[in-house]
Amino acid sequence: MGQPYCNPSPLVKVGTHTPPLSSSWREQNAIIIIIIKVRSMRSLRDAVCYVVTHEIAADANSFWIAWSAGAQVLANDTRIMYRPAGFNATLHSKLIEEACDQADALVVTVPYAAGSAAYSELDRQINRCLDLKPNFPVVVANTDTYRNRHAVGYVGSQNYATGQACGKLMAFEDPTIANGQKSHDGSTLMIDQSKGVLAYMAASEKENTGLQARFSGLRASLQNYGVKIRLTYDTEELAGHENVVALSIAWVADIEQTFARFGYTPRSLTVCGDEVWPPKNISGSHSPLLFAGQSPFRQGYIAVATALGVMRSSSWLAGIGTTSTADTFAVPYDVQT
């Protein structure tokens, strides 16, 4: 199947945009659905696509709610078996094996660090499947730190680059600078360097190498402007800090509840990595909640659409780049072979 990898560049937006769950979103991306249906030699209703992610099922949050909703858009056209494994590598491996035995395609996330026992186990299971079924479509999603030359490709964000864009957005609060459309030369730094930035990530995600890469990019970017940053796993530590960044939309509600409990409003709260829909202000403030990064809904949708499309035609993935105007960041795909 070759080794195409979809590596979209991050797009940073502040303000309104099309709601990811709206009918207009489906209309904008209808070309993808049309391609799948036209290229199908038999009804996709006969097919089964497994989606195995590192979502922690007992900890439902806005990121995975949106992501899984996108992944299941095509449920009327095929059987989508959504299977969250959390950070249980044994379960994750078992679900990959189950998918290989029972499904026609697989969308999978691999959140672990290369060289770790968990990473090796999932990689072994994916390779075992592809050895047994060389034409079985495997699409890696969301976790850009995993690469497999036998997989169809990767659909998701570049976490380190996203972190860098977040740093620029926090430093200058100007999306055109964050996007690289305008130089920051002559622009006013919006962060008090002496106060720095405090970033938050849930302790349950410590093994997530994508989020680690995102934080590394954020830290490198802010340090370029003389701004110090550190990471915490305790929301209460955020209260009283002037500049706060959440490394996922998943934890914004918890953070704002903490602020409300302490009667505190930060000068800025930024979501690094995910879009915020609908646009909102920081609780108790007229300041906008800034965000930089991916659309979870769009990412889940395109990952499954890619798996189903490739199942019918090995050339379908390259077709996304020429027929679709949007990827997970609403910019054209860069398909590298």
Image (cartoon, rainbow, N blue to C red):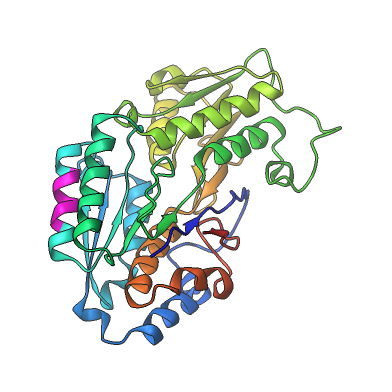
Residue stretch in magenta: 92-98
Q: Is residue 280 visible?
A: no
Q: Whole-percent x and y of residue 79?
A: 21, 71
Q: Which residue: 62% across, 50% down?
A: 13
The residue shown at (79%, 45%) is: 182
Q: Nearer the viewer, residue 108 or 242?
A: 108
Residue 219 location, quadrant:
top right
Residue for point 30% across, 65% down: 72
Q: Position of residue 246 (x, y in %)?
A: 47, 33
Q: Main secondary structure of the magenta part?
A: helix
- Seen as rendered, the residue at the extreme right is 186
Residue in front for this viewpoint, 153 or 202: 153
The residue lying toward the viewer, choosing from 287 and 290, is 290
Q: Residue at x 34, y 69 (%)?
A: 73
Residue 329 shows up from this direction: yes
Residue 303: x and y in percent read 39, 61
**Horizontal and vertical percent position of residue 265:** 54, 27
Image quadrant assignment for residue 311: bottom left
Q: Quadrant of residue 111?
A: top left
Location of residue 116 with respect to 139 vertically, above or below: above
**Is residue 233 rendered to the left or right of residue 325?**
left
Q: Is residue 13 magenta?
A: no
Q: Quadrant of the N terminus?
A: bottom left
